[in-house]
């Protein structure tokens, strides 16, 4: 019995030793494999560029200049058509287009490696009188003053496809910032020339908005507007369309979904609130001015506000154009704040977060910075070179930048929005025709798709000249 017990103990001891040896392995302990988990940072920002078209002279080739957002440095330059007069880029920020003094259309890719060999040209009809270029809804339009038509261009490169008749000489074509159902051509009615709205904007005829269905390229409706309609902007949700009438200080509101004026019999919505539709809005001048003269606007998607530059009244208007959850005008729709700025505000841009607006004061050679929360001027106006007519903004890092261009200067002024100071100026070849940015966070993108030239949506202005001289300048435009 004792020997048996001894054998059992030996077997048990051996089993324990084997187990220990099995667990220990060949002198190496088991180490589980650990896969590190990397932290996820913010999404990469899209590359952002400022693109400037300038004209050294009316007959020599213009220059397209691509400027880097981060370093404010010139990345590429390329010659385009002679004497460019109009510049715009498409809704994706990928391609630029110019109308040139020899009647050609330039098409070029927006790239840091842009070269002359990448610029292509299309010849317009011999009798065409294109005034402006527009690229909404993945289409390219030209307002053609000959024959009361808008010319449609398609293809790669863009070439003339067809002309769509409208009611009178159009000055602008606007549509949604993404492909939608229709675009709108805006005209100023039975008027001898669009420059008449610069000579005497308060006595002009009423205009029309012509709805063009994108599926068939045909007109589906013609809607009445106010006097001297000069500009228009589409909301990013494609539900409302706003037309600025310089002659009577109004903004016509169009219901883009119904293709009608935004008017209705007041009704009770599903939440039990009374809904009142607004077929028009009114803007006001700064104190001491009799006339506001809205000429440019930007829709800020973050705040659902329309910010309007009132050229003749030295003010901007900040208008609530929000909708309720059912797509009707909200209870606060039409609430308006009037903020005095500098002299002759020609354009305005709004930061992506809706905190501030930057206003290009053409007669002052300044940019006003407006706090959109308190509706007050934030600081003294910043001086810029020349008499600015275009101001655009973008954001590609922790702060944004604002680009200011004057048609009588070869210098592009760049502002930093974290400090609200002039960051630098960039010299290009020849006076600037216009500037665009390839990314516009928080806005409808209409800075990209809508162009203006003096007399055709843009007020005539001759630096340092008398009112009579400016009148002559308008009269001698094509």
Image (cartoon, rainbow, N blue to C red):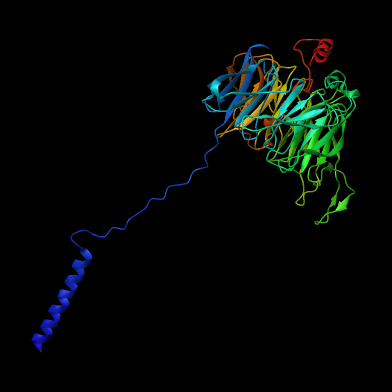
Q: Residue furthest bottom?
A: 1
Image mark count: 0
Residue 226: x percent and y percent? 87, 31
Residue name at image x 11 percent, y 86 percent:
4
Residue 377: x percent and y percent? 72, 27
Quarter of image, res 256: top right
Can I make out residue 334 in this image? no
Quarter of image, res 54: top right
Q: In the shown orientation, is residue 37 left or right of residue 392?
A: left
Quarter of image, res 218: top right
Q: Quadrant of the N terminus?
A: bottom left
Above or below, 340 relative to 278: above
Q: Residue furthest left?
A: 3
Q: Nearer the viewer, residue 114 or 343?
A: 114
Residue 276: x percent and y percent? 86, 47
Above or below, 427 relative to 328: above
Residue 122: x percent and y percent? 66, 24
Residue name at image x 57 percent, y 24 percent:
66
Q: Quadrant of the C terminus?
A: top right
Q: In the shown orientation, is residue 399 left or right of residue 333?
A: left
Q: In the shown orientation, is residue 444 left or right of residue 4?
A: right
Q: Nearer the viewer, residue 386 or 187?
A: 187
Residue name at image x 57 percent, y 31 percent:
48
Q: In the shown orientation, is residue 203 left or right of residue 164?
A: right
Can I make out residue 68 in this image? yes
């Amino acid at each position: 019995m004792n020997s048996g017990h001894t054998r059992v103990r030996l077997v048990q001891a051996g089993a324990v030793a084997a187990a220990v040896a099995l667990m220990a392995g060949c002198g190496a302990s088991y180490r589980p494999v650990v896969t590190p988990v990397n932290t996820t940072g913010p999404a990469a920002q899209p590359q952002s560029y400022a693109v400037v078209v300038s004209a050294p002279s009316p007959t020599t080739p213009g220059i397209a200049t691509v400027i880097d957002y981060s370093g404010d440095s010139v990345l590429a330059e390329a010659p385009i058509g002679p004497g460019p007069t109009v510049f715009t880029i498409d809704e994706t920020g990928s391609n630029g287009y110019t109308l040139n003094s020899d009647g050609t259309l330039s098409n070029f890719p927006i790239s840091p490696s842009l070269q002359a060999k990448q610029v292509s040209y299309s010849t317009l009809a011999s009798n065409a009188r294109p005034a402006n270029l527009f690229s909404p809804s993945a289409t390219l339009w030209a307002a053609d003053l000959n024959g009361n038509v808008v010319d449609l261009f398609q293809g790669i490169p863009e070439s003339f496809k067809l002309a769509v008749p409208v009611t009178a000489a159009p000055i602008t074509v606007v549509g949604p910032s993404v492909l939608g159902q229709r675009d709108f051509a805006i005209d100023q009615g039975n008027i001898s020339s669009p420059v008449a709205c610069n000579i005497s904007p308060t006595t002009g005829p009423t205009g029309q908005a012509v709805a063009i269905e994108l599926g068939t390229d045909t007109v589906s409706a013609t809607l009445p507007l106010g006097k001297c309609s000069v500009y228009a902007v589409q909301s990013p949700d494609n539900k409302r369309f706003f037309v600025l009438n310089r002659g009577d200080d109004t903004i016509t509101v169009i219901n883009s979904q119904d293709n009608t004026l935004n008017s209705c019999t007041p009704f009770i919505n599903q939440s039990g609130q009374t809904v009142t539709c607004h077929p028009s809005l009114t803007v006001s001048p700064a104190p001491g001015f009799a006339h506001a003269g809205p000429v440019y606007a930007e829709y800020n998607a973050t705040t659902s506000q329309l910010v309007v530059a009132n050229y003749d009244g030295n003010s901007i208007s900040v208008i609530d154009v929000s909708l309720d959850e059912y797509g009707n005008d909200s209870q606060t729709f039409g609430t308006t704040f009037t903020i005095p700025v500098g002299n002759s505000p020609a354009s305005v841009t709004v930061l992506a977060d809706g905190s501030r607006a930057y206003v290009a004061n053409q007669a002052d050679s300044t940019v006003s910075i407006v706090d959109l929360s308190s509706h007050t001027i934030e600081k003294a106006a910043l001086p810029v070179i020349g008499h600015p007519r275009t101001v655009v903004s973008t954001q590609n890092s922790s702060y944004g930048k604002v680009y200011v261009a004057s048609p009588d200067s070869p210098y592009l002024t760049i502002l930093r929005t974290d400090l609200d100071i002039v960051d630098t100026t960039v010299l290009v070849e020849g006076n600037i025709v216009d500037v665009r940015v390839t990314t516009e966070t928080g806005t409808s993108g209409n800075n990209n798709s809508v162009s203006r030239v003096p007399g055709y949506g843009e007020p005539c202005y001759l630096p340092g000249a008398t009112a009579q001289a400016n009148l002559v300048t308008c009269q001698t435009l094509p």
